[in-house]
Amino acid sequence: MKYSTNILFLAIIFMSTLIVISSNNYINMWMGLEVNMMSFIPLMYKNKNTLSSESCMLYFLVQSFSSMMFLYSILLNPMMIKESSNSIMMTMTSIALAIKMGLPPFHYWFPQIMEKLNWNNCLILMTWQKIAPMFILSQMTSTWMIQIFMITSTTMGAIGGLNQTSIRKILAFSSINHMGWMIACMKYNQNMWMVYLMLYSTISYMIIKIMNYNSIYFINQMFMNSSTTEKVIISTLMMSLGGLPPFLGFLPKWMVIQSVMASEGLFIIMMMILMSLITLFYYLRMMSSMLMINSSINKWMLVKKNNKNMNIIFLLNMLLPSILIINMF
């Protein structure tokens, strides 16, 4: 019964996102966002403990406030006759969507909720729950708001993860940083952000699958609960998430760099690359604690039965060199 209800709510989340994407007016989009929120909350409360209750309440309050602001901005537009009413509506709508997605400076709720969720819900919150608000934001014409969110997301996503020891919070700030890159896709090449989100979701799924399998939630657990093979795969996935070549995660960032450079946004892309280097620092901190602190290797960890899933994850992460070689000929 428990799994059937999970499948039901996941199906409603999927359908609500399709409602938002297929809608041609803001009222239907708002309805899709509300259905999406009310379907995700039961999945969050699956464990039925204090942490789940706190995360559900915080998520409900934040999403309700942003939905109220979104609806108010929609209803405000027909009442105002001035020419500036459209820009006011777009600004309020953009802020409401930023609150929904956890974009800076409205991001404080996002790491706190991530800390209280299990890994499966973390994956949904980092990836699928971004699709509907990002789609609506891509229809906005307020380019100056999009540029502000792009700069603040890449900056706060990089700086916020520096002093964290919880892997879920580190991935939350990493998600915020990647949202800045997706918004840059949206500004300079409107349809590319979906490709970026798809590749980011693939890498996040591979990381969370390993973390969930080994019950890893903090940095100091990484060198205790994993085999040598898994440590190497986690390290490559972290470098891929940071956008380091030649791994898969460099491909979407390379597409963004090309689009921004074509639009003569040299200063913006240099700042975004600098922030990505800062994110690589806390990825390297996780890798160093996993690979270097515990130098003793037990034989039973090396003779562990071959895991096909780990091999598939490693091959997927190494797809980028193959793609680049194919494009050369």
Image: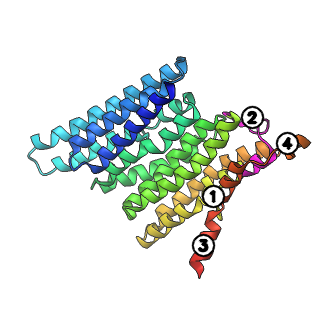
Residue at 52%, 61% in the rendered image: 252
Contact flag, marks 2 and 4 (Cβ < 8 Å): no
Which residue is denoted by mark 4 in the rendering? 301
Q: Is residue 181 found left or right of 328 in the rendered image?
A: left
Which residue is denoted by mark 1 in the rendering? 316
Amino acid carrying mark 1 in the image: Leu
Would residue 104 be visible to someone looking at this image?
A: no
Label 3 – label 4 distance at C-alpha: 34 Å
Amino acid carrying mark 3 in the image: Leu
Residue at 31%, 49% in the rendered image: 21
Q: Nearer the viewer, mark 3 or mark 4?
A: 4
Contact flag, marks 1 and 4 (Cβ < 8 Å): no
In terms of sequence position, does the residue under pointer 1 or pointer 4 come before the other? 4
Q: Is residue 300 magenta?
A: no
In terms of sequence position, does the residue under pointer 1 or pointer 2 come before the other? 2
Which residue is denoted by mark 2 in the rendering? 220
- Residue 311 x, y percent position in the rendering: 71, 54
Q: Nearer the viewer, mark 3 or mark 1?
A: 1
Which residue is denoted by mark 3 in the rendering? 324
Tell me, for residue 248, which label it has, or none.
none
- Residue 95 x, y percent position in the rendering: 33, 42
Label 3 – label 1 distance at C-alpha: 14 Å
Label 1 – label 4 distance at C-alpha: 23 Å
Amino acid carrying mark 4 in the image: Met
